Image (cartoon, rainbow, N blue to C red):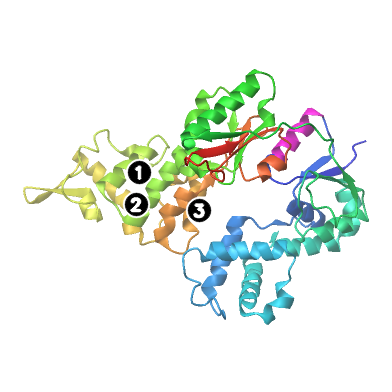
Amino acid sequence: MIRLRTSIVGGPLAFQMRRAAAARANECGLQILTLPNLAARLAGGFRSPAPSEQLDRAIQQALAAGGFREIEKVRHLPGMTRAVSRALRKVWDADVSLRSTGQKNGRLSDLALIEERVRLELPLATALPIDLRDAALARIRHAVHTIGPLTIDRLSWIPPLWRPLIDALATEVPVEWIASPCAETGWFAGRIVRPPEVDRPAPLALSCADPYHEVIESLRWARHLIASGVARPDQIAIVSAGTAPWDDHFRALAPDAGFRLAFPHGIPALSTRDGQRCAALADVLQHGLNQQRLRRLVSLCLGERSAFESLPANWVASLPRGPTLSAPRRMATRDIGGRGERCVSGGRAGRFADRGYSRTGHLGGGRSRGPRSARQGAGALAERAAQRPSRSYRAVPAIVALRIRSRRGRFRGVVLGKGAGHRAAPARPASRAHGPALASPAGQRLHRS
């Protein structure tokens, strides 16, 4: 008989590693969930936590409605959606009810108004974290049949929002917490399990000239550990507070490292062909058509079974050199000796230019979605992210900042993580920390092993 039980993990990397370990051990009946998914599982009704994309879109609509006491003058500023989203998440994690405290302060009153509007904008199947927690508490009596024995796997800190749910579950099912010595467990009423202490070598500080040098030394260090048998790739982590200075170097040098390198925080969208295709489309929609942008877009979309496949082989040679492509008439014809002539015999390129211009839109002024081939794969995700901001001029910067999920196995390779969470949630005994927090007198960069 299969015995139902649940394991709570801290993030995507920990989820992948725990699932891989469960598959190797043939653990049938095990549910691997995060804290929001735990509440959704107990709440039932096919409810799920609101994803960040839906939450940001609902916040934009809430800000656009206006009627605020303090933030009315700044609600249209760039970055306001991100700032409100972060503020709401901090309020929810702190388990603060804006409905009861919102009237005491103008800014809290504005946040309470935004929260109420976001509730109305979200789909019926999604819910805010605080509402999801309350719905789970209302159905706590079903925990025996939906959750079973609960294990909190190496979480160092649980936000106050989820603590009442954990305490309520402890009265219905056995709950244990595999906690590190630095975990905050004073509020926990269940069973605490401490992992056995192991002898750890003293940290070693190394000095490097620049981020490129740091990446080379880190790859050499990981390769040495693997070749000498000290650690497996899934036991090695390279972490830093921010990975931006090292991401490009790691992606360039990873194929020659001889081992798998995983990016749990995602890879830049522009490092993929789909991201480049979507960026080319966003450039056309934002800045309008010219020969350079058109050639780039067509070259990236060829071979994707799109309308661009109907172009003749010599279509580039038929484009006029002088006039810009700012209107359909200029795209379809060119002026030779004072009279307009078709670019290609039979008007094939002219007809394609008319279709392409109508699809991409003039100067990005319309709501055109662009060619279908530019929206396939990761490009569709990039385009949705570019359309989230309320101002069209932010489309290209949004794609530049977008990261997509890496296809490499996160649990099998050396992890390049962002922040201490990627190192603390799943146990990785061999870790290396990058960053300029340590500085030598000569100004050289330091990192710890």
Whether the magenta-drawn stretch holds residue 16 is answered as yes
Residue type (three-letter) at the residue carrying disc 1: Leu
Check residue 297 in the rendering and tell me which mark sits there, or answer none: 1
Check residue 384 in the rendering and tell me which mark sits there, or answer none: 3
Q: Which residues are magenta?
A: 14-25
Residue 103 vertical placement versus 406 (above, below): below
Spatial distance from mark 3 to mark 2, Cα to Cα? Answer: 16 Å
Q: Position of residue 207 (x, y in %)?
A: 53, 34
Q: Position of residue 96 (x, y in %)?
A: 73, 69
Earlier along the polypeptide chain: callout 2 or callout 1? Answer: 2
Kindly indicate whether the residue at mark 1 contacts the one at mark 2 (C-beta within 8 angstroms). Answer: yes
Which quadrant holds the N terminus?
top right
Q: Position of residue 275 (x, y in %)?
A: 45, 43
The residue where tag 2 is placed is 284
Kindly indicate whether the residue at mark 2 contacts the one at mark 3 (C-beta within 8 angstroms). Answer: no
Left or right of 42, for residue 214: left
Left or right of 337, for residue 267: right
Q: Main secondary structure of the magenta part?
A: helix
Residue 422 vertical placement versus 234 (above, below): below
Spatial distance from mark 2 to mark 1, Cα to Cα? Answer: 8 Å
Q: Nearer the viewer, residue 348 or 57?
A: 57
